[in-house]
Amino acid sequence: MNDFRAAGHSAVDLLADYLGGLADRPVWQPVEPAARERLLGLPLPVRGRGLEELVAEIGREVLPYPMGNGHPRFFGWVNAAPAPAGVLGALAAAAMNPSSAGGDHADVHLERTVVRWIAELAGFPHPPGAGLLTSGASMATIVALGAARSRAALRLGADVREQGLAALPTLTGYAGVESHSCVRKAVELLGLGSRNLRTVASDAGGHLDPAALQAQVRADRAAGLAPFLAVASAGTVNTGAVDDLDAIADVCAEEGLWLHVDGAYGAFGVLDPVVAHRYAGLDRADSLALDPHKWLGVPVDCGCVLVRDPAGLRATFSLVPSYLRDDSGDGLGWFSEYGIEQTRPFRSLKVWATIAAAGREGIARNVAQCTAMARRLGELVEAEPELELLAAVESSITAFRWAPAGVDAELLERVNQALPAAVQERGRAFVTGTVLAGREAVRACLINPAVTEPDLAVLVAEVRAAGAELLKTLGG
């Protein structure tokens, strides 16, 4: 193990230097063509190499070309900077390398604890066994909607696991205009058909309209369909909008629908007292998907699904062959009975380390810093005549566009479509684009608590400068 010990020390020094120097580097830069070719054309080694040599090559060939999400001026998508405690937890978990499907070893018990912690942070009820860690919110959504489908089938007198969907009338689900694509993917993979996922009218801010939801449910039921599911957002990806969860929960209770809340990115916003009121009703959901690898900064991959009824989740997925019988006596069974994965990685240690290092107070402080900076960015945008704020800042996403007066509307669209890539290539900030109400937009997501107001000023300046350059280029 001497080779491992020496290489391990070198690796920690390398990574500490890398993490410590991120703010002094360009946020992102393209992979150099020669480096790309080296990475793409690596031959299968015939002979092995020493660990220290491998660490040195990682430093030369990999670390110089990051996605950029560790930098405080990375505002793209919803990708977090890794929490150092989580990095250490991931390293220790890899050294143990268990399968966290079940059994009596530390990772299993630790996962039950961190799932409970996540529920406590989000203010979601948590009976024992009512949740598990997943690869991300996409998998969490499949698990949650699978349980919703099973409950609907049982209410209709069928067992979907045994009989399949042919034994059922057409199950219909409902989601807002701004719902995440993982909801449609889950519906498709579960055999429900994307045409049976109704898009419910939303208001100008992108919030699902509870009255429109109820009207659509009743119309579908009158047409002989079987409404069973509504999906609400606790922070949409485009603008960070939080649906009226209490009102939607009222509709679901009255109409007998399973309420699933997509809180992958935004649910932890409930920890900020300034915006916590927006999350009223979150605790009434039947299921909640969250991503600790987003706002908490847990290294990828780590999602989480929480459910109100652990028995229903287990009934949906449990399949225990004789060689995996659980004799622990706690009655909860294995995690593999509550989801799709059998062999499961040791995710809980990096979650435990990340939350334990910050504590609830530290996490809440980090969330509040991000939401405050998003609101401040909104103010900076509104103060710039060349920029236009496109949506109210409800959590930690600010959506806006470059829109100086006197520029042709069609040209403005082309400039704003090209704007995010132009900003990225300049290297001083990283932002991504989207389409809101049919218009090209820039969206800045703030989930790195290291961001400061000077970082926001850089972003605004870069958007203005890149917009002016694109106007000259595209305007002829």
Image (spheres, rainbow, N blue to C red):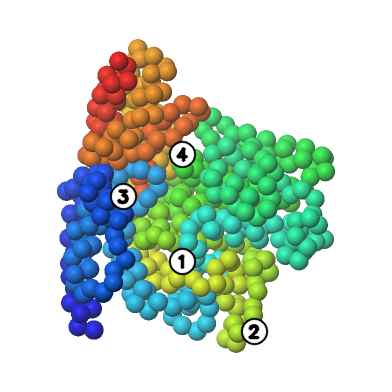
Q: Are marks 4 and 1 in contact (CB under 8 Å)?
A: no
**Residue at mark 3:** 67
Type of residue at label 2? Answer: Ser
Q: Dot 2 surroundings within 10 Å: few (below 14), some, or many (20 or more)?
A: few
Q: Position of residue 120 (x, y in %)?
A: 48, 63
439 or 274, which is in the foreground?
439
Per the model, the C-alpha gap separating discs 2 and 3 is: 45 Å
Mark closest to the chain's N terminus, 1 or 2 = 1
**Residue at mark 4:** 238
237 or 35, which is in the foreground?
35
Mark closest to the chain's N terminus, 4 or 1 = 1
Which SS class for mark 1? helix
**Residue at mark 1:** 117
Determine which quarter of the picture holds residue 225: top right
- Please tell me the numbered disc located at residue 231: none
For the C terminus, give its image quadrant: top left
Q: Nearer the viewer, mark 3 or mark 1?
A: 3
**Residue at mark 2:** 322
Q: Dot 1 surroundings within 10 Å: few (below 14), some, or many (20 or more)?
A: some
Seen at 45% across and 71% down, the residue is 345
Seen at 74% across and 49% down, the residue is 171
Per the model, the C-alpha gap separating discs 1 and 2 is: 32 Å
Which SS class for mark 2? helix
Seen at 36% across and 73% down, the residue is 94
Mark closest to the chain's N terminus, 3 or 4 = 3
Determine which quarter of the picture holds residue 462: top left
Q: Nearer the viewer, mark 1 or mark 2?
A: 2
Per the model, the C-alpha gap separating discs 2 and 4 is: 47 Å
Mark closest to the chain's N terminus, 2 or 4 = 4
Q: Position of residue 97 (x, y in %)?
A: 40, 77
Type of residue at label 3? Answer: Met
